[in-house]
Image: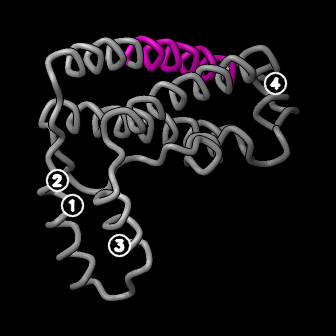
Amino acid sequence: MSREEELARLNDARVFHINTMNKVSRIIRNGSFMGIPPKVDYENCSFHLWLTANNNDLSNIIGSIFHSELVDMHKKWHDLYGSIYKDFFDSRKLIAILNKIENSTKETEKAKLLVKLNKIKIRLSAYEEERLIMMQHEMKNVSAKLLLILDSSERKLKAASSSLF
């Protein structure tokens, strides 16, 4: 893979992460779902798939320390998001609708299910709301660190020897 292709993939991963973080923030802010929530399982996340693609060529180019920091921060982000999801978002109703959307082959049926999904409200006590805000703050901090490591990785990619590509 060429340097330009790696840089484009890194940028795609950055944009994906930012969009995912924004989606979670919107769910928390609005107290309801606006579309399908991000995946909890980090191994099925597009960002993780980018990190582990091509037999770890990325690790060889940016260095194993940067690569392992990216993996660690990404896992930490998903652990926090997983806790938020499990503690505040997870419900039988949500799971049932998400399963129906995933298994549906008709676009009209999916659209109707998305409308139902958007009507699910997250109701929290004052304590739960405070706890959620604290967890979201921690998740934003991890996200900021992840983005800083991505910026450093981008600089390393740009400066790497052409022989690594």
Q: Mark 1 or 3 closer to N-term? A: 3
Q: What is the x, y in percent for residue 93?
A: 28, 60
Work out whether residue 36 or residue 65 is closer to the camera in this orientation and state it. Answer: 36
The span shown in magenta is: 140-157
- Contact flag, marks 4 and 1 (Cβ < 8 Å): no
Q: What is the x, y in percent for residue 73?
A: 59, 20
| Residue bearing the label numbered 1 | 117
Q: What is the x, y in percent for residue 22?
A: 28, 34
| Residue bearing the label numbered 3 | 101
Q: In which quadrant of the rendered view does residue 18 lie?
A: top left
Q: What is the x, y in percent for residue 162?
A: 81, 31
Q: Mark 3 or 4 closer to N-term? A: 3
| Residue bearing the label numbered 4 | 161
Q: Mark 2 or 4 closer to N-term? A: 2
How far is the residue under mark 1 from the one under mark 3? 10 Å
Residue at coordinates 11% horizontally, 57% vertically from top-left?
119
- Contact flag, marks 3 and 4 (Cβ < 8 Å): no
| Residue bearing the label numbered 2 | 120
Q: Mark 4 or 1 closer to N-term? A: 1
Q: Amino acid at mark 1?
A: Leu
Report whether 22 appears left or right of 40. Answer: left
- Contact flag, marks 1 and 3 (Cβ < 8 Å): yes
Q: Amino acid at mark 3?
A: Ile
